[in-house]
């Protein structure tokens, strides 16, 4: 249930009204917009009398929400959410609400020289965040599984060298204790419905980059976000990374229609991963541009200094030079869309 309050409602009166509502057995989420304050009621609202609420002097409108996701719903939070990341050195990186977040780096951390050189290259080109896999979920148990904790150490070295906040994937709750220095925790497609992990991340106070599952609907993605948000962590970035279809021409099928659909139904930032979506390096720039044109709040792109020798997903990684060329175009797209690069 959504309760839109009248313009100019006093803060102390809102607090008293919130306490009254919580006395009815529901949780109340307050969203303060530029022109209106909205209260989102989560829980069993079937016994709450709408007419009685409408008679309250603070209330302008009461709406029942039909969708199963509540906190992620734009009706609960009409204004776009912005994720702010402290990058140190007096800098803040942002994603959402008018800011484009560009995340770039190798699929997997391999050596110190590799990750540091790529980090420096993508930063010079204009990327705001460094991605890199330390723990790698692979289809085959015999494929390279990542460097693990050593890979995290190398990511932190690259962060120290460049100042770029780091994004890396968490595969297990047990790994959380070594993720202190990570700025954004990525939940991969295979873990999108790992509800035990999502609940634990709800108690975490780091931003979560949540990737859509290989065969998951948009509603299922939003419900996965709801699991995290119900635990108190509302700093979530949704990522469209392609879904599995009958077509084998590309690694996955990039569902760009998910971008405007998500932007309509949720306030959370939405980014696109053109690398995993296509699996083909030469397709990445076109799909990155299309993502921004579709309204995405950013992209996450795989960049490797020597793709042919990459230990993981070299065929979908672009070179630093190709990334620099892409960034020049994306900057013009951002300007046309009226967004700021972060």
Image: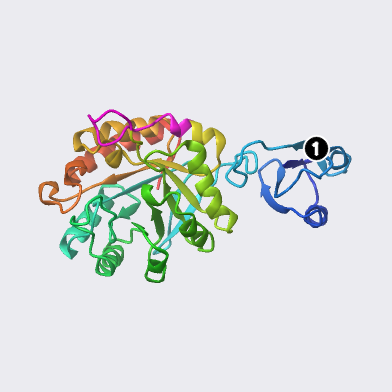
**Is 251 contained in the magenta span?**
yes
Rendered image quadrant of residue 258: top left
Identity of the residue drawn at 43% across and 39% down: 216
Reading the image, the residue beneath label 1 is 60
Q: Categorize mark 1 by other alpha carbons within 10 Å: few (<14), some (14-19), many (20+).
A: some
Here the colouring is: rainbow
162 left or right of 305 in image: right
Label the magenta part by its dominant secondary structure: loop
Q: Which residues fall within the magenta stretch?
A: 245-260
Residue 327 in view (yes/no)? no
Q: Position of residue 8 (x, y in %)?
A: 78, 44
Query: 313 or 236, which is in the foreground?
Result: 313
Q: Nearer the viewer, residue 116 or 124?
A: 116
Of the 4 image quadrants, the one containing the N terminus is top right
Q: Quadrant of residue 52?
A: top right
Residue at image position (28%, 61%) is: 134
Furthest residue toward bottom: 177
In this rendered view, identify the residue nearer to me: 100 or 332.
Answer: 100
Q: Is residue 86 visible?
A: yes
Task: In this rendered view, identify the residue nearer to me: 46 or 111.
Answer: 46
In the image, 255: left or right of 263?
left
Quadrant in the picture for residue 56: top right
Judge whether residue 198 is colored magenta: no
Considering the numbered disc 1 on the image, is that residue within a helix, a strand or a loop? strand
Give how far across and how far down residue 140 sits, in percent. Answer: 22, 52
């Amino acid at each position: 249930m959504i309760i839109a309050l009248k313009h100019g409602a006093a803060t102390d009166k809102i607090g008293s009204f919130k306490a009254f509502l919580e006395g009815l057995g529901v949780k109340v989420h307050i969203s303060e917009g530029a022109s209106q304050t909205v209260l989102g009621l989560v829980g069993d609202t079937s016994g709450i009398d709408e007419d009685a609420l409408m008679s309250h002097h603070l209330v302008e409108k009461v709406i029942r929400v039909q969708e199963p996701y509540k906190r992620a719903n734009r009706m609960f939070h009409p204004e776009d959410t912005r994720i702010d990341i402290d990058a140190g050195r007096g800098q803040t990186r942002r994603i959402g609400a008018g800011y484009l977040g560009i995340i770039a780096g190798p699929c997997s951390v391999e050596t110190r020289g590799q990750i540091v050189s790529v980090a420096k290259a993508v930063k010079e080109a204009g990327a705001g965040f460094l991605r890199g896999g330390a723990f790698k979920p692979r289809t085959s148990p015999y494929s390279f599984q990542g460097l693990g904790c050593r890979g995290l150490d190398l990511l932190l070295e690259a962060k120290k060298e460049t100042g770029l906040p780091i994004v890396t994937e968490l595969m297990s709750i047990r790994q959380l204790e070594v993720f202190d220095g990570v700025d954004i925790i990525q939940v991969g497609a295979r873990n999108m419905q790992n509800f035990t992990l999502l609940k634990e991340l709800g108690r975490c106070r780091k931003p979560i980059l949540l990737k859509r599952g290989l065969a998951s609907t948009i509603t299922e993605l939003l419900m996965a976000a709801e699991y995290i948000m119900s635990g108190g962590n509302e700093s979530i970035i949704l990522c469209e990374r392609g879904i599995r279809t009958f077509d084998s021409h590309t690694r996955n099928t990039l569902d760009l229609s998910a971008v405007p659909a998500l932007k309509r139904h949720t306030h959370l930032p939405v980014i696109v991963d053109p690398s995993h979506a296509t699996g083909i390096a030469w397709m990445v720039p076109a799909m990155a541009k299309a993502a921004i044109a579709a309204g995405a709040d950013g992209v996450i792109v795989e960049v490797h200094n020597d793709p042919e020798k990459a230990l993981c997903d070299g065929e979908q990684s672009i070179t630093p030079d190709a990334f620099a060329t892409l960034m020049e175009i994306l900057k013009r797209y951002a300007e046309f869309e009226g967004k700021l690069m972060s």
